[in-house]
């Protein structure tokens, strides 16, 4: 079963790459960003993206009006060329530093499930059915797919990264035209969903994952804390008291 969000474009060979990597576990694909339609004042892109876009379209004057950068039929005619033209680079939630530190197999990394979002993911259909699919109690932005991956992990499913299975996230308007306001809205929804996630699972790794979003702890730091707890009962009690009693 291959998951891809409805705002994403699959690169050539996307499904084949997932099929080639299938090993009975979960395969996390590689995610990139794409700008397919420029709409002034409505899209959350930074200065570097704007400069790259201005270079491609022939100057900043053309950015004063809406501009379609990918027309109907262009993907079918020349997918590689069309995607190269709208590519804005890879997404941060590839967690490149984690992959470089632990390898694509994510060996000995306790939070591989935290990388496994359904934006680009393949998992055995029977495994999804076994854990009961998605929890529809999650609402708004974030966590329904991470919760699914966590439950798959608890059932013994191992996750790995396959960088050849690429898709492109189209930059699109957010909950508010002001990126700062939109970020606040999404963060509030995420924190509510993280609360439900922790209430549901009541485990140290779930609470450490929430702490990554609350305190800017990295997943690598959370991994180190969890490994310490596995070998030091006193440290585990301290961590559980600190992170799980709030």
Image (tube, helix red, strand yellow):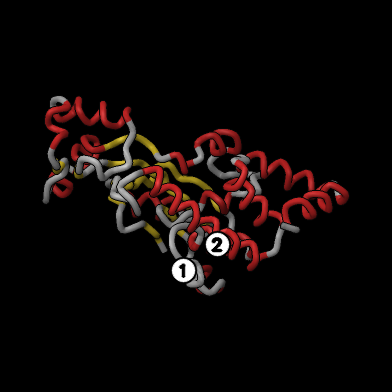
What crowding class fits label 2: few (fewer than 14 Cα within 10 Å), some (14-19), or many (20 or more)?
many
Residue pointed to by mark 2 = 147
| Secondary structure found at label 1 | helix
Closest to the camera, between mark 2 and mark 1, is: 2
In the image, is 73 to the left or to the right of 206?
A: left
Q: For the residue labelled by badge 2, is the local secondary structure a helix, a strand or a loop?
A: helix
Give whichever of 164, 50 is nearer the camera.
50
Q: Residue 182: give x, y in percent of width and height.
A: 39, 49
Q: Which residue is mark 1?
A: 125
124 versus 218 height, above or below: below
For the residues bearing labels 2 and 1, Cβ distance under 8 angstroms: no
Indicate the position of residue 85 as horizontal and vertical percent values: 21, 35
Give the x, y percent position of residue 90. 38, 37
Can residue 10 be spotted in the picture? no
Residue at the extreme right: 234
Q: Residue at x 62, y 43 (%)?
A: 215
Near-viewer residue (10 or 23) = 10
């Amino acid at each position: 079963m291959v998951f891809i969000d409805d705002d994403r474009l699959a690169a050539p060979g996307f499904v084949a790459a997932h099929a080639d990597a299938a090993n009975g576990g979960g395969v996390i694909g590689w995610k990139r960003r794409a700008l397919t339609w420029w709409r002034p004042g409505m899209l959350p892109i930074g200065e570097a993206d704007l400069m790259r876009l201005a270079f491609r379209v022939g100057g900043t004057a053309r950015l004063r009006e809406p501009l379609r950068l990918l027309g109907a039929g262009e993907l079918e005619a020349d997918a590689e060329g069309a995607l190269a033209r709208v590519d804005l680079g890879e997404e941060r939630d590839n967690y490149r530093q984690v992959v470089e530190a632990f390898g694509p197999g994510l060996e000995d990394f306790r939070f591989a499930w935290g990388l496994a979002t359904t934006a680009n993911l393949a998992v055995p259909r029977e495994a999804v059915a076994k854990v009961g699919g998605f929890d529809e109690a999650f609402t708004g932005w974030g966590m329904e797919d991470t919760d699914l991956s966590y439950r798959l992990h608890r059932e013994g499913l191992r996750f790995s990264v396959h960088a050849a299975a690429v898709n492109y996230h189209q930059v699109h308007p957010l909950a508010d035209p002001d990126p700062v306001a939109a970020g606040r809205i999404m963060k509030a929804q995420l924190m509510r969903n993280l609360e439900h996630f922790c209430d549901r699972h009541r485990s140290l790794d779930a609470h450490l994952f929430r702490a990554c979003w609350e305190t800017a702890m990295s997943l690598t730091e959370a991994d180190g804390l969890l490994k310490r707890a596995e070998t030091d009962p006193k440290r585990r009690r301290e961590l559980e008291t600190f992170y799980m009693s709030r």
